[in-house]
Amino acid sequence: MNYISIKNNQTIPLSSIPELEYHLFLEQNVFALMKSAGAHCVNYFGYPYAGKIKLICCIANDELNNINISSCIVDIKQPLPSFTKHKLLFEKFEREIHENFGLAYTDHPWLKPVRYPVNRFNKNNTIANFPFFKIESEELHEVGVGPIHAGIIEPAHFRFICNGEQILHLEMQMGYQHRGIEQLFIEKKKLLQRITLAENISGDSVAGHSVAFVNLWESLCNYQPGRNLLWSRTLALEMERVAVHTGDLSGMCTDVAYHLGSAVFGRLRTPVINYFQKWCGNRLAKGLIRAGKTNFPFTHELALELTTMLDEYEKAFEEISDELFSLPSALARFEKTGVITIKQAAALGTVGISARMCTIKRDIRSSHPHDLYTEMLHRPLIKTHGDVYARTRIRKKEIVQSLGYIRQLIQNIPPEENGATPLSAPSPDSFTLSLVEGWRGEICHCAITDNKGELIHYKIKDPSFHNWLALALSVRNNEISDFPICNKSFDLSYSGHDL
Amino acid sequence: MLNNLKILFHQGKQYIPDVTTAKAPGVFRGRPVISAEKVNEKELMNLCPTNAITSNPVSIDLGKCTFCGECAFAFPDKIKFTTDYKIATNERNRLIIKEGQDEPVELNPELIRQEINKYFSGSLKLRQVCAGGDGSCEMELNACSNVNFDMGRFGIDFVASPRHADGIVITGPITENMAQPLQICYDAIPEPKIIILAGTDAISGGIFEGSPALNRSFLTKYKIDLYVPGNPIHPLTFINGVLDFIKKRK
């Protein structure tokens, strides 16, 4: 075995990552490291290296609580056997490497564009000429939706192949949201610019992505954050989980035409995000998380207000939840709709709710804890059936769990630490990996620095990157009218995927 | 049925009675005020992540500002953010707040076309296009129509088809990959039509300004009817801006 095992948010010298021959690299990451049930790929990417491409593969082991990193230098002119041939969960990572650098794979089954990045290898591939899967049949028809959808949501194109009302196949074309954010991380040198970029990766996961960035950055600068910082980050993550899950429950009620549920869950999200505004001046927590400091110390008045808000929230939330989960007309739409089996989820390497909905205990809060989760002994909430109902129910239960964590946190507000030392420069020739369990699932940021400590590569992986294919598979054999509820039940990020 | 009525009763009144006078709770950062205090202007300008601050006189461009508030934390005697959320306007220059200026941001009635009030003051249907937005302005636009803000009471709604719309609301910095869909959507809206830019990303590109993955040429072709600053926009900023726009010029 030839890899280096690190913990979440650990900075290591770049030279300590073993470089393997490609066939050994494949053997190790696809077979040896994947033997454990808790093994999954948290990031796999390439970056230009001395005229060639250096591939870095990061396989997390949830049982041993470590992440195993190895690398391989490849020549883009040399076609290679793919990881995907053996394990589907590498599918999109390899497509991304192919799209960015033109690296050819001899046996990748589906080497299609991922997001049409501005610096892609093949500029002849444009978003207007995506190679959609086609079926020659007079019985079947295609339905194209988007990129602009009926509601106020982000753009992507969905192409359904249907037999009457029944969906046989769904293919998604992404990339409309691509803003070149990874490149901007390197070009914009000010720390404030970089944290602002992190806040703008995905507007529903502001806390998730900004905590991932600051944890990574502080590790890279060898900075030990005070307890007050860890505390406020943990609180922000749990608040964000409550807010977005509540909004999602509202959306799911909308999609099954249960208007009272939609209105009540919708209005219940308001006090939670308004609380963010009271705390940091922004309803979505932009500006709250900063590396090495906080601009918004948490006070006892804020704690009192939070308790009052939660008491009111919880009462109304329990009442409407009881009604929703005993309402036959809603349950009939949720149950056995949009099913992903355990086998499918394991093969796809889904994360977050999309893994926990079918018995996979994948939760960074318990397996690779960061911030105050190290003390919280979090137990992931699990469902079995992988349908819309499971995803709805997990949200309800996770809200209750998060409310418990928030109440527990505000019992013990750490004092402000005065005279915070400014961050030093990032370590040169280093590699850092940061994992955060956002409300949607595992967020992974990786950074590589050069010999002056300047960023030369920044890699962001939103949980949606793993989960979009799960949505596409879940709608097969469902009625096309159930697509909206399936889509909402996953609630994946377009901007987090397209970057 | 009884349970549903009980829930309905327990909600009480959730709507904001008057969205034009509502107070923004907490430490909300709205319109900034810049004092005459002498500071190291170079340092102040350097601090800003989006180059929204310029000197001589010191000014903040709300079309570029991300409202992160770092300048106010670093120079508390120089810059203060008030909770005034009415910062939408129809003239790009009015988004630039200068030293010593402490009056509300208003619309310029001269720039509002005469037919706007006649056609849209009682009913305005908008089509939203997200062109690289991170989803935050989109969530806040959705919130405009929820039971709290209830923009529908003024006859302002978002519609699914551009054919049914009177105008377009653009969020996000406008990516190269969305440039064509945006144009197609705009072309499908019948005349007379309006363009609203919602959020810092849409107005100036925000933190994404200068990225080669953007294509903002659409904005050079048309007159923009309303700028709504914010990162993301606050629902009250949007609703008040649009109300002023359709009612101001009789």
Image (cartoon, rainbow, N blue to C red):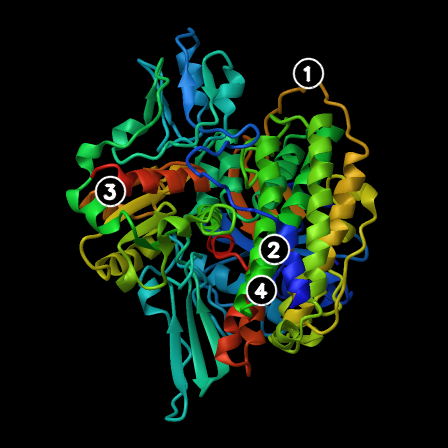
Q: Are marks 2 and 1 on the same chain?
A: yes
Q: Distance between the residues labelled 1 and 3?
A: 47 Å
How far across and down, in percent of the image, does residue A250 sit?
58, 59
Category of crowding for the residue at label 4, using alpha-carbon neighbours closer than 10 angstroms: few (below 14), some (14–19), many (at least 20): many
Q: What residue type is labelled 3?
A: Ile
Q: Distance between the residues labelled 2 and 1?
A: 42 Å
Q: Closer to the N terminus: mark 2 or mark 1?
A: 2
Q: How far apart are marks 4 and 2 (CA)?
A: 9 Å
| Residue occupied by mark 3 | B224
Q: Nearer the viewer, mark 4 or mark 1?
A: 4
| Residue occupied by mark 1 | A419
Q: Nearer the viewer, mark 2 or mark 3?
A: 2
Is A251 placed above or below A106 here?
above
Label 3: state its secondary structure: loop
Q: What residue type is labelled 1?
A: Gly
| Residue occupied by mark 4 | A253
Pointers 2 and 1 in contact (CB under 8 A)?
no
Pointers 4 and 2 in contact (CB under 8 A)?
yes
Residue A383's image quarter? bottom right
Q: Distance between the residues labelled 4 and 1?
A: 49 Å
Q: Which amino acid does label 4 sit on?
A: Cys
Pointers 1 and 3 in contact (CB under 8 A)?
no
| Residue occupied by mark 2 | A265
